[in-house]
């Protein structure tokens, strides 16, 4: 117990591998985006996790120019979008 097996990722690491956190100027919040979206150079609109995981929240399309650089754990977490960070599956 507590020993990390090489090559095995924790749930948090897997999550980080799949998602990137970006500040969106559209609503001044930090959202989680699939890296597959962000990394696609042909794409210029992005939908955060919160709109993918619930039908209650209307689609939030963010343009590339509206997103910050990727944020890390030192970000201002008071700005984290609650549904995005609650939706971890
Ligand atoms: Zn969100």
Image (cartoon, helix red, strand yellow):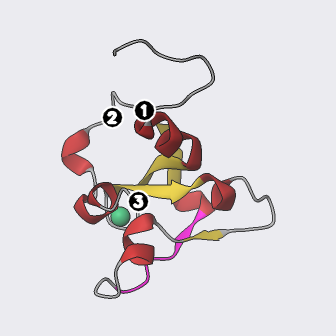
**Residue carrying label 1:** 72
Q: Where residue 14 sits: x, y (%)? A: 52, 41
For the C terminus, the quadrant is: bottom left
Q: Residue furthest front?
A: 1
**Side of 41 where 6 appears, left or right:** left
Which residue is nearer to you in this view: 41 or 63? 41
Which residue is nearer to you in this view: 89 or 68? 89
Mark 2 vs 1: CB contact within 8 A: yes
Magenta span? 58-63
Residue 23 drawn above or below residue 84: above
Residue positioned 42% across, 12% down in the render: 3
For the N terminus, the quadrant is: top left
**Residue carrying label 2:** 75
Name the magenta segment's main secondary structure.
Answer: loop
Residue 51 falls inside the magenta stretch? no
Q: Earlier in the sequence, mark 3 or mark 2?
A: 3
């Amino acid at each position: 117990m507590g020993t990390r097996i090489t090559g095995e990722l924790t749930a948090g690491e897997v999550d980080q591998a799949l998602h990137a956190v970006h500040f969106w100027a559209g609503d001044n919040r930090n959202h989680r985006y699939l890296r597959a979206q962000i990394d696609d150079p042909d794409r210029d609109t992005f939908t955060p996790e919160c709109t993918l995981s619930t039908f209650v929240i209307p689609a939030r399309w963010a343009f590339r120019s509206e997103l910050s650089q990727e944020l890390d754990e030192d970000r201002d977490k008071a700005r984290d979008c609650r549904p995005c960070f609650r939706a971890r599956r």
